[in-house]
Image (cartoon, rainbow, N blue to C red):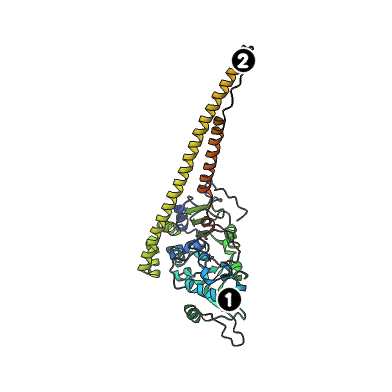
């Protein structure tokens, strides 16, 4: 991925009828996309209510201070876990499968599987929501592991899932049932200091065999996952469903950008495919009427928040442009004033040459005029610079959020929600 051109390709598509969701839908319905590979990140689970890691105030790490950790990320550090497993299991009660429900985007992937179009799903998430939506487990490759299985960190013996749930609900730490071991039990999610699952590396060849790749809700900033789109053959379409363009997607002739809320764009895609009714029915059957209403209401609230943020940003930009306009007017007036002074000085000099008997006179420089001129420029420049910085300097929240706003190089073995 890092080798690709970052500029958007303006040339015509080679494979797709058109470079939009309608063109991708036509490509699928023609029967030419027999192997579809899907890549997902934290953005696909946002509507489910799962917190991301780093957003200030609401991110997971920002709310771990109550656990008295040496640093927030320690909760996912294998060395720290060996000595202090309790904080992780306090957190696990909040994140363990069963509390959250799949989104309509998860249901769309399950629908692809039902239609025998899904080759493989690669996910950075550990929430298991794709499995709950109905995606077969043998189709899922969890790059950072998941809560689906668990084992002893010493002897590697698997631990019963039902017993694991009981321990998590009680908030206590499970240990290996082998009396000679009694090691700590941990879900099979990748902690800092652990290797990625071997299964991940074994399955990456599937990208090179794909007829179509759908990328949903990921910042493509964490390697080696971020390298997956670069493994797709030339001429094979890649479609990005995300809030913003990431990972160089859009640089190739058959790349399609579906930017915006993931669920909204997926619904739009389902409309183009003629699958919308099937999709909504499948999603409702998985999560129930109440959860459907909750997620839809949350989406409306989120859209209102985005509108407010856009309005604020627009106001900031307008303010900067207004100040810039004032600065230009002030500069124009200053130039006129300086030209007037030069003209007067030239006239005095000319008069002096014509009447040499008259003592040479020079117009005294007016301290107030000079100060006013420089002062106007400095005040205008300083104010403009401050407003421009406020309008354009990225905030910490911009740099941080998933998987989707992201931002924010992380270790390759970091677990992702």
Q: How far from the left and from the top, in percent, is residue 209? A: 57, 61
Tell me the residue that label 1 is attached to: 84
Q: Which of 124 and 345 is in front in this view?
A: 345
Left of 218 or right of it: where is 278?
A: left
Q: Which of 135 and 300 is in front in this view?
A: 300
Crowd band around label 2 with a 10 angstrom C-alpha radius: few (<14), some (14–19), many (20+): some
Q: Kindly identify the residue that appears in the image at 53 percent across and 45 percent down.
A: 386
On residue 275, the disc is: none
Q: Which of 49 and 248 is in front in this view?
A: 49
44 in relation to 167, above or below: above
Q: Which of 68 and 239 is in front in this view?
A: 68
Q: How far from the left and from the top, in percent, is residue 308? A: 41, 52
Q: Kindly identify the residue that appears in the image at 52 percent across and 73 percent down.
A: 147
Q: Locate residue 104: give its quadrant.
A: bottom left
Which of marks 2 and 1 precedes in the sequence?
Answer: 1
Q: Tell me if I can see residue 381 in this picture.
A: yes
Crowd band around label 1 with a 10 angstrom C-alpha radius: few (<14), some (14–19), many (20+): some
Q: How far from the left and from the top, in percent, is residue 88? A: 54, 73
What's the distance in space between the residues labelled 1 and 2, CA to CA?
91 Å
Q: Is mark 1 on a helix, strand or loop?
A: loop
Q: Quadrant of the N terminus?
A: bottom right
23 in relation to 363, above or below: below
The reply to whether the C-beta atoms of the residues labelled 1 and 2 are less than 8 Å apart is no
Q: What element carries label 2?
A: helix
Single out the mark in the foreground, 1 or 2. Answer: 2
Left of 357 or right of it: where is 145?
A: left
171 in relation to 54, above or below: below
Tell me the residue that label 2 is attached to: 352
Q: How far from the left and from the top, in percent, is residue 381? A: 54, 40
Q: Tell me if I can see residue 143 in this picture.
A: no
């Amino acid at each position: 991925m890092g080798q690709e051109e970052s500029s958007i390709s303006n040339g015509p598509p080679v494979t797709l009828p058109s470079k939009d969701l309608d063109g991708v839908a036509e490509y699928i319905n023609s029967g030419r996309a027999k192997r579809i590979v899907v890549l997902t990140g934290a953005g696909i689970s946002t509507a489910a209510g799962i917190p991301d890691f780093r957003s200030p105030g609401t991110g997971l790490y920002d709310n771990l201070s109550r656990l008295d950790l040496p640093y927030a990320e320690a909760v996912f550090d294998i060395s720290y876990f060996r000595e202090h497993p309790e904080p992780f299991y306090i957190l696990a009660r909040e994140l363990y499968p069963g509390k959250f429900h799949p989104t309509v985007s998860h249901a769309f992937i399950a629908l692809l599987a039902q239609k025998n179009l899904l080759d493989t799903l690669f996910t950075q998430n550990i929430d298991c929501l794709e499995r709950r939506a109905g995606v077969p487990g043998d189709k899922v490759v969890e790059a950072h592991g998941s809560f689906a299985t668990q084992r002893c960190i010493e002897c590697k013996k698997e631990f019963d899932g039902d017993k694991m749930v009981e321990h998590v609900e009680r908030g206590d730490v499970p240990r290996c049932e082998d009396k000679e071991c009694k090691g700590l039990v941990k879900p099979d999610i990748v902690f800092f200091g652990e290797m990625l699952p071997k299964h991940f590396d074994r399955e990456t060849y599937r990208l090179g065999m794909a007829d179509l790749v759908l990328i949903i809700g990921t910042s493509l900033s964490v390697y080696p996952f971020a390298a997956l789109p670069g493994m797709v053959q030339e001429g094979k379409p890649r479609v990005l469903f995300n809030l913003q363009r990431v990972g160089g997607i859009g640089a190739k002739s058959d790349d399609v950008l579906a930017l915006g809320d993931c669920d909204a764009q997926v619904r739009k895609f389902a409309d183009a495919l003629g699958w919308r009714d099937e999709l909504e029915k499948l999603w409702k059957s998985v999560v129930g009427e109440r959860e459907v209403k909750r997620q839809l209401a949350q989406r409306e609230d989120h859209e209102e928040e985005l509108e407010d943020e856009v309005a604020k940003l627009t106001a900031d930009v307008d303010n900067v442009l207004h100040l810039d306009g004032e600065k230009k007017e002030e500069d124009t007036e200053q130039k006129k004033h300086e030209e007037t002074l030069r003209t007067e000085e030239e006239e005095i000099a000319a008069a002096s040459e014509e009447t040499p008997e008259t003592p040479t006179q020079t117009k005294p420089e007016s301290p107030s005029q000079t100060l006013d001129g420089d002062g106007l420029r400095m005040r205008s420049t300083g104010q403009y610079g401050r407003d421009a910085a406020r309008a354009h300097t990225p905030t910490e929240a911009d740099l941080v959020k998933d998987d989707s706003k992201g931002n924010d190089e992380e270790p390759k073995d970091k677990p992702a929600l």
